[in-house]
Image (tube, helix red, strand yellow):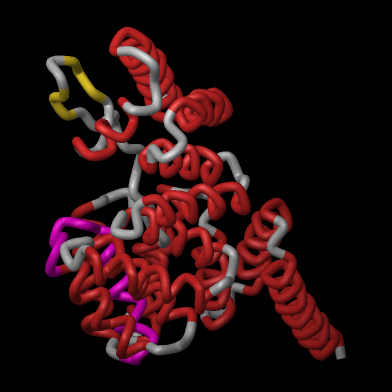
């Protein structure tokens, strides 16, 4: 799972006896020269502060269109306010405008090249878009600027997993877990790295920790079930896939994994029912490759079932 930093509340510093709304005194001093008088400076500050705070509240409440409008007003008043660009980028990201998000995160680091959060969030957008090399470069930059960011290590681990660099991914997830030991996502991701490397016992341990930290973590149950199945624990695997579906009835891979086990146990009808559920979910999501694979598996089982029935008739 790719993680992102959240919205940034209005930063404040004391300046000339007023409540200034800038990230540092030098920025505030620069802004003062932009306006004609102390009164106009105060008015512009109040206008900008109102837009920023309302934009922050709108974003926190899920009104991303309203937030984008407010943060746009902020950067019109103060064109080099990097936190406003960052927040607008995140609002665009969450509303589905990935290109707009990348543009705003890029503007953020253009204004403040040391703003680690923007590199991490832009990297997450690149990763979601399959632009792995660009994502890796951004996470490298974010980590170089802030080695205390578990989120950056976690996301760089995800890139390394996508590049099949499992040892590098494991090293990143180890850092993420060390920095944030109560983070269920970091435990889940490290479990995936262990599983990819064939270290099933370690994977099971991490997935177990993940569900202890987040009891409703359906994906962790799904993947622990897979590790248990590969270890020969059929009952444990079935129990985990049942749990995953109890927490999230749309956990498609729990259906496909359970279907495979049902087929191995000779429960062909149950296997086909699970595969149909998975196919429906993949189709609804627009996951055409996964949908096509499940349909091929169903056709193979149905053909095998038909052959067996014909043999019995003879």
Q: In x, y percent, where is residue 99?
A: 62, 53
Task: Please name whichever residue, 84 or 26, is drawn nearer the observer in this view of the structure.
Answer: 26
Reply above or below: 230 against 81: below
Residue at x 67%, y 70% (from the top left corner): 290
Residue at x 46%, y 43% (from the top left corner): 90
The C terminus sits in image quarter: bottom right
Q: Is residue 227 left or right of residue 96?
A: left
Residue at x 43%, y 75% (from the top left corner): 136
**Residue 119 makes an appearance in the image:** yes
Q: Is residue 198 left or right of residue 131?
A: left
Q: In x, y percent, where is residue 265?
A: 52, 79
Residue 185 counted in the magenta span: yes
Tell me which segment is drawn in magenta. 178-198
Residue 189 counted in the magenta span: yes
Residue at x 28%, y 89% (from the top left corner): 199
Q: In x, y percent, where is residue 135?
A: 47, 70
Q: How many marks?
A: 0
Task: Please name whichever residue, 200 or 78, is drawn nearer the observer in this view of the structure.
Answer: 78
Q: Is residue 13 left or right of residue 264?
A: left
Q: In x, y percent, where is residue 176?
A: 21, 68
**Dominant secondary structure of the residues highlighted in magenta in the image:** helix
């Amino acid at each position: 799972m790719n993680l992102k930093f959240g919205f940034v509340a209005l930063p404040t510093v004391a300046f000339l006896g007023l409540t200034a709304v800038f990230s540092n005194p030098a920025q505030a001093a620069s802004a003062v020269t932009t306006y004609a008088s102390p009164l106009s400076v105060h008015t512009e500050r109040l206008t900008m502060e109102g837009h920023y705070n309302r934009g922050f509240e709108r974003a926190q409440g899920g009104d991303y269109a309203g937030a984008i409008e407010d943060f746009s007003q902020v950067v019109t008043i103060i064109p080099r306010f990097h936190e406003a660009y960052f927040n607008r980028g995140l609002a665009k990201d969450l509303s589905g405008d990935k290109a707009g998000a990348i543009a705003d995160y890029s503007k953020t680091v253009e204004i403040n090249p040391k703003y680690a959060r923007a590199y991490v969030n832009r990297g997450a957008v690149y990763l979601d878009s399959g632009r792995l090399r660009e994502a890796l470069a951004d996470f490298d930059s974010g980590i170089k600027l802030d080695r205390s960011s578990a989120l950056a290590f976690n996301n760089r681990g995800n890139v390394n997993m996508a590049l099949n660099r499992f040892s590098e991914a494991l090293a990143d997830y180890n850092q993420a877990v060390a920095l944030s030991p109560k983070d269920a996502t970091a435990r889940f991701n490290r479990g995936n790295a262990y599983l990819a490397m064939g270290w099933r016992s370690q994977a099971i341990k991490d997935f177990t920790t993940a569900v202890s930290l987040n009891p409703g973590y359906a994906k962790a149950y799904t993947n622990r079930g897979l590790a248990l199945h590969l270890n020969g624990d059929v009952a444990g695997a079935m129990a985990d896939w049942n749990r995953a579906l109890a927490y999230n009835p749309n956990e498609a891979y729990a259906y496909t994994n359970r279907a495979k086990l049902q087929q191995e146990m000779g429960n062909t009808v149950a296997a086909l029912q699970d595969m149909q559920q998975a196919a429906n979910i993949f189709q609804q999501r627009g996951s055409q490759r996964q949908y096509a694979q499940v349909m091929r598996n169903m056709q193979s089982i149905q053909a095998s079932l038909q052959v067996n029935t014909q043999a019995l008739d003879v």
